[in-house]
Amino acid sequence: MTTTQIARIALVGDRSPHVKSHTRIPLLFDALASREGLVLDAYWIPTGDAEAEATSGALARFDAIWVLPGSPYASEAGALAAVRVAREEGIPFLGTCGGFQHALLEYARSVCGLTGVAHAENDPGAEDLLISPLACSLVGHEGLVRAQPGSLAESVLGAERSTERYHCNYGPSPRHLPTLVAHGLRLSGHDEDGQVRIAELPGHPFFLATLFQPELAGDGTRPHPVVKALATAAVTHATRSATR
């Protein structure tokens, strides 16, 4: 795909040179521009600023929002606000690792009415955890992910199975997952043990969240299909916005 349309993307997270995904993303965007003609103008937004950016309407003017790894975030509320804006405004969204966890948390609280659910990393003493410590850490782990047939995940990955890289210690508890599904969220990817690894929102232009980190695939010169799909959705959003 070749285009001169530039898409503005909000990278929501607390940028750090010690978080590998943060250092990898600029390389991926360079590769997307040179290899695919997908040009992204990236703005890094700390989670501490994201809630105000959401309230002011500034986040809604982006063509895509990516909630990045690097939790615990400086502001849980900021990360959740970024997810909510993308979900409600139909803005292409990607959440990876911590972004996946907070996408589920926002949906549970805002859509499902589970206002008391918590993330163990942010509130380890909470009684009702939606996101809890994994039985086995996935830091530095690679594992098989199976995408549901007919899902956005399968379409993006280009196959029912893929091997993906992780760097996390937290994941969704099974207790409330049926409620999320009943309210419209699709849990579209699982590992070999049946644990949820991908979620998406049917009817949204592009809303995908992965517990794995596609930005860590390879050496950064060939963007992962998930990253390319987000970029494609962002450019499509920018093109449509420009013609309105």
Image (tube, rainbow, N blue to C red):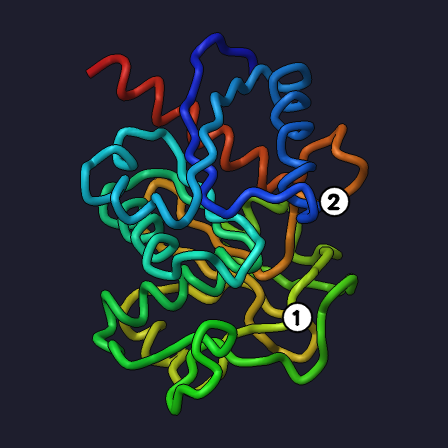
Location of residue 23 in the rendering, given as x and y in whole percent from the top left corner: 68, 37
In front: 129, or 45?
45
Which residue position holds label 1? 191
Q: Residue at x 40, y 66 (%)?
A: 104
Task: Name the element at disc 1.
Answer: loop
In front: 197, or 78?
78
Q: Residue at x 49, y 82 (%)?
A: 173
Instruction: State left or right for residue 63 relative to residue 208.
Output: left
Give amino acid for label 1. Asp
User: Quadrant where the N terminus lies?
Assistant: top right
Residue 97, label in figure = none
Which residue position holds label 2? 217
In front: 184, or 129?
129
Q: Residue at x 71, y 69 (%)?
A: 138
Location of residue 191 in the rendering, given as x and y in whole percent from the top left corner: 66, 70
Location of residue 119 in the rendering, given as x and y in whole percent from the top left corner: 44, 75
The image quadrant that residue 89 belongs to is top left
